[in-house]
Amino acid sequence: MPKRPVSVRAAALLSVAFLAATATTASAQGGPPKSGGIPPSEGPRTSAPVNFASPLRSFTIFDKADKSSDQKPASPRSRFLPKFRAGLMAESAARDALAAERRAELAQMGGPEDPSAYGERWAELEEAREEVRRGEDEVRVEMAYDRATARFSKPEGPSSSSTDGSKRSGGYQFVGVVNAPGEVKAGKKDKVTWYARPKPTGSKWSVRLLHVDREAIVRDMFVSGKVDVFGKYVNTGKMAVDVGPDGQSRATRMPIIEGQYAVKKRSWKNIWNFSPKHLFADSSGMRWRERRLTPGLYTDGKVVYESAYRYSDGRAGMKPVSNLDSFLQSSTIKTDVKENLLQRLKEDSPDVVVEQ
């Protein structure tokens, strides 16, 4: 994975019994101090619009259309409405014919004037006979509907034998894949890698260019639990530059940290990236509660923060208490501790990282 620079802030930790120097990180270069999980104010929250990006972007060059392809294919709506209309008309005509037959049967029907001549269960027998007749009528109506709509269900176009994928038309199809900028700059690959294959029958394009958004694919694989992303933060030894109110640039003590990321696939060969050290020594908290930071003071090279923890929400944070210049000028801090702190800001990697 390509390296992505991350601007961070380094900090010093002050314990109750003694003074020790460590390095942590906070917000981006030149930004205002952040308090982690503790917001500076309880005002209304605003969210930016969400943009959805497809992991594959393609550009296709289609073949020149011939006369046979001038006619656009029928839409599903234009195919459904005539079929539905023909079916309703056939169903209505079938029901009218059944009603006429029923009226003719009733006109010709005769029987004894005394109802007792029909027997004791004449009502049940007549109801069962009527149920059988209604079932036969529904079958006749369905057959009429199917006969009327059968001509609309026939596939339009060439037969299945002519569209067999095994048969090929003349020519080839060319597909170009845009390579990553890092591989192109390193000279490992060209800007575009081209592939070719025999053109299948019925295909209407010859050239296609694909741009693969690798970051979107890696994120999708991470969300699906197929890969893990590992980050390592390295102190570059460079200090951030701050622009003053007068427009002049001034060097600060804020180190610039570079993030190095690697993607590892989960499999049984690496025990699905399981690490006992990470489980027992670097846990991220329990359920929705964040891991508590070591109590003490932290600095990003400009501002000194005090770690805090809000028990009601289970969130860790930092609140600014002073600036680093006043901290270094204090007479209560030993000289060797100050020198050790400045040395760690220049060389050591951070202990806590907050990316933005």
Image (cartoon, grey):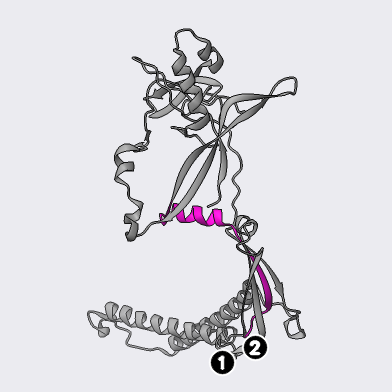
Q: Which residue is mark 1?
A: 161
Tell which tag, 2 or 1, sits nearer the viewer. Answer: 2
Query: Where residue 20 sits in the image (x, y, percent)?
Result: 40, 21
342 displayed left or right of 226:
right
Which image quarter: residue 310? top left
Q: Are marks 2 and 1 in contact (CB under 8 Å)?
A: no
- Quarter the C terminus occupies: top right
Q: In the picture shown, does residue 287 fall above or below 344?
A: below
Q: Nearer the viewer, residue 111 or 38?
A: 38
Whether residue 96 is visible here, answered yes or no, is yes
**Secondary structure type for disc 2:** strand
36 displayed left or right of 313:
right
Write the residue at 62% across / 57% down.
Answer: 186
**Secondary structure type for disc 1:** loop
State yes or no: residue 283 in magenta.
no
How many residues crowd around disc 2 within 10 Å: few (fewer than 14), some, or many (20 or more)? Answer: few
- Looking at the image, is mark 2 or mark 1 earlier in the sequence? 1
Q: Amino acid at mark 1?
A: Ser
Write the residue at 68% across / 77% down.
Answer: 205
Query: Where residue 58 sits in the image (x, y, percent)?
Result: 65, 65
Per the rendered image, the range of residues in magenta is: 201-228
